[in-house]
Image: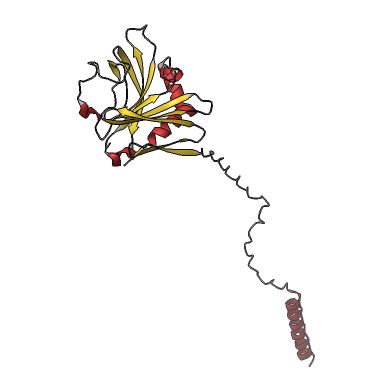
Amino acid sequence: MTRRHSSFKAAAALALAAALAACGAPQASPQTTKQGTAPPSSATASATPMPTPTPTPTPTENLATFSFTTQKLSLRYPASWTVDAKTYAGMGGNGESAAFKDALGKPVVTVQINSGAYDVGWPVQRTVIESGALPGLAAGGFAGYQYAYFAEVPQPAGGPGTVCWLRISSQVPSDGAGVAGGLPPGGPVPVGPGAVQPPYFLNVWLGGEDLNRCGSVENAKAWWASKEGQQVRSAILSLTAG
């Protein structure tokens, strides 16, 4: 009995120790997966783009229209200019001229129909500053006609000084040696009455000594680039026939 009681006590002690061991063992913590989190966004403010400056529109110049009476021809010119129109007997038909002056009364440009004169006869060295087509004349029988603005220096030096010209023709004068007025080195070619065709003679003169006698090629270029020069250019480019 004594031995059996001891065995029972030993077994009970072992069971109690096991139970206590189980109770005292540290419990495994449940594993948690740490989710990746985005770093807090920076408080940097996005830059606001600067607005593109709007260019100031160029004021549109007020224009007037002049219509010739002897031919179906018109042009636009600054409304501040005045125009003196005349008709007369011209080459091969009725002649007509329109002389334009600026607001101060200074002659600027004259457009002539069936009339013209050339102050020619001396050799020159020519510089063509600008030339171009005149599409508004094509419908009136002037297909292929162009304008040309050029300066001529008399040769040899000592003549009347550099002269500026504005011409309308089917052929632009060439740079280099020539005869005053945009003519070739051999001078004007003899022509008959048919020279006023097609369908009439059209001529342009720069008005006033200060324009025609421009002093130098550099002065000629500077005037053409000026407001007045560009006004004359626009008026000639606006020529419309038909």
Residue 139 percent coordinates (x, y): 29, 42
**Which residue is situated farthest in the front direction here?**
89
Give the quadrant of the C terminus. Answer: top left
Q: Nearer the viewer, residue 38 or 204?
A: 204
In the displayed structure image, the side of residue 128 where residue 190 appears, left or right: left
* Number of numbered tags placed on the structure image: 0
Quadrant position of residue 216: top left
- Looking at the image, which residue is at 23% across and 28% down? 195
Vertical comparison of 113 with 15: above or below: above
Of residue 198 and residue 161, the one placed in the foreground of this image is: 198
Residue ID at (40%, 37%): 75
Q: Measured along the vertical axis of the image, is residue 76 above or below residue 168? A: below
* Residue 118 position by quadrant: top left
Q: Position of residue 239 (x, y in %)?
A: 37, 36
Q: What color scheme is it?
A: secondary structure
Most extreme residue toward the bottom, as rendered?
1
Q: Which sits in the foreground, 98 or 76? A: 98
Residue 212, compared with residue 12, is above or below; it is above
User: Residue 131 location, x and y as percent?
Assistant: 34, 29
How far across and down, in percent of the image, does residue 130 sit?
36, 27
Q: Residue at x 78, y 93 (%)?
A: 1
